[in-house]
Image (spheres, grey):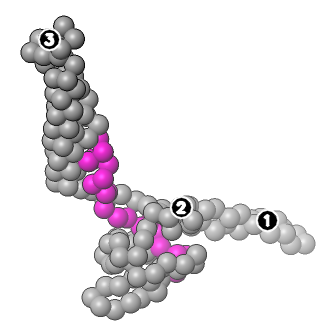
């Protein structure tokens, strides 16, 4: 449960699936170790974690931006090799190479970050941040003339 509380914050929009299969979209108002307060249509409703089967939220676009920044920077650094002939290798081209490396890497990172943000934003999916685990409880039963067991299956 602690990992769920770290991933979800106040004001996050989530989709809650209850144990009976009902799904609802709401905003997180408050979290505790045993329940979550949801706001939907201006009404706050406390829901116990024991009644929740699944919590989903939108995949953040930050990971797309990070991947885009790294890819764009790598492409920018690679493009610096194209500038070697233009700047020369006679020792006078050091400033030229430094400027071009800085500009090419910066432009590549900016373009990659924007492209990554756009792609991730356009393809945003819900990801499960909490799934209640299935449990099976088996209890032996004994009587004077019989024996058996009782089982409770929860999913």
Residue 155 visible from this viewpoint? no
Q: Magenta residues, as a range?
A: 48-67
Image x and y of residue 138, in percent: 71, 63
- Residue extending farthest to the front is 92
Is label 2 in a helix, a strand or a loop?
A: helix
Residue at mark 3 to residue at mark 2: CA–CA distance: 55 Å
Residue 130 visible from this viewpoint? yes
Image x and y of residue 130, in percent: 47, 63
Residue under the image location 47 percent in, 73 percent down: 52
Q: Which residue is mark 2?
A: 3
The mark found on residue 82 in the picture is: none
Q: Which residue is mark 1?
A: 140
First in sequence: mark 1 vs mark 2: 2
First in sequence: mark 3 vs mark 1: 3
- Is residue 17 highlighted in magenta? no
Q: Is residue 30 left or right of residue 65?
A: right
């Amino acid at each position: 449960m602690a990992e769920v509380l770290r991933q979800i914050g106040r004001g996050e929009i989530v989709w809650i699936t209850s144990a009976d299969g009902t799904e609802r979209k709401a905003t997180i108002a408050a979290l505790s170790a045993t329940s979550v307060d949801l706001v939907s249509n201006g009404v706050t409703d406390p829901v116990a974690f024991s009644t929740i089967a699944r919590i989903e939220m939108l995949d953040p676009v930050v990971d797309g931006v990070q991947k885009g920044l790294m890819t764009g920077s790598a492409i920018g650094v690679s493009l610096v090799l194209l500038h070697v002939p233009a700047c020369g290798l006679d020792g006078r081209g050091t400033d030229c190479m430094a400027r071009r490396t800085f500009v090419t890497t910066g432009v590549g990172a900016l373009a990659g970050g924007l492209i990554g943000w756009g792609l991730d934003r356009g393809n945003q999916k819900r990801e499960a941040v909490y799934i209640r685990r299935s449990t099976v409880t088996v209890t032996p039963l004994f009587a004077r003339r019989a024996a058996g067991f009782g089982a409770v299956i929860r999913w």
